[in-house]
Amino acid sequence: MHFRNEFKTLYSEIEKLMKRDLHQFVGEAKFETLKKEILDVLKTLFGEASREYRVVKLTNSPATVFKVMNHIAARTKTKTLTSIKTAVNM
């Protein structure tokens, strides 16, 4: 559960970074720090062999990292909603 909260925090940080620097070069030091933290969380949640981890590790694009995190967040919401619907239908 701790890593999911950390994921949410990092997701909001990268989102702020993307909004602030949408059409400009993102501060490389800030991005590299966030990327390392994101990789640690992804490694714990999904493992090094996961597609999400590999894509983030190989990219130097903040937009790509944001897209991966957005995809994970959307997928997590869908799973939560599916679990709730299943519990209600039982």
Image (cartoon, helix red, strand yellow):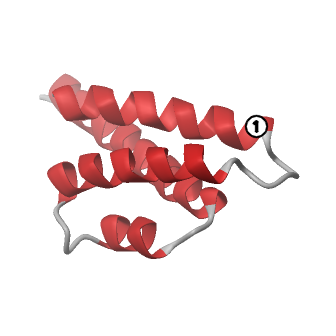
> Quarter holding the N terminus?
top left
Across and down, in percent, residue 35 comes to 45, 52
Q: Nearer the viewer, residue 59 or 87?
A: 59
Q: How many marks?
A: 1
Q: Nearer the viewer, residue 31 or 7?
A: 31
Q: Residue at x 58, y 48 (%)?
A: 29
Q: In this rendering, is residue 45 above or below 46?
A: above
Across and down, in percent, residue 14 comes to 57, 40
> Quarter holding the C terminus?
top left
Residue 25 as seen in the image, left or right of residue 34: right
Q: Residue at x 37, y 52 (%)?
A: 36
Q: Nearer the viewer, residue 78 or 54?
A: 54
Give the quarter of the image for residue 80. top left
How many residues crowd around disc 1 within 10 Å: few (fewer than 14), some, or many (20 or more)? few
Q: In this rendering, is residue 55 above or below 63?
A: below
Residue named by callout 1: 19
- Looking at the rendered structure, the kind of residue marked 1 is Lys
Q: In this rendering, is residue 9 above or below 30?
A: above
Across and down, in percent, residue 84 comes to 25, 27
* Residue at far front of view: 29
Which element type, helix, strand or loop, lies under badge 1? Answer: helix
Across and down, in percent, residue 81 comes to 34, 33
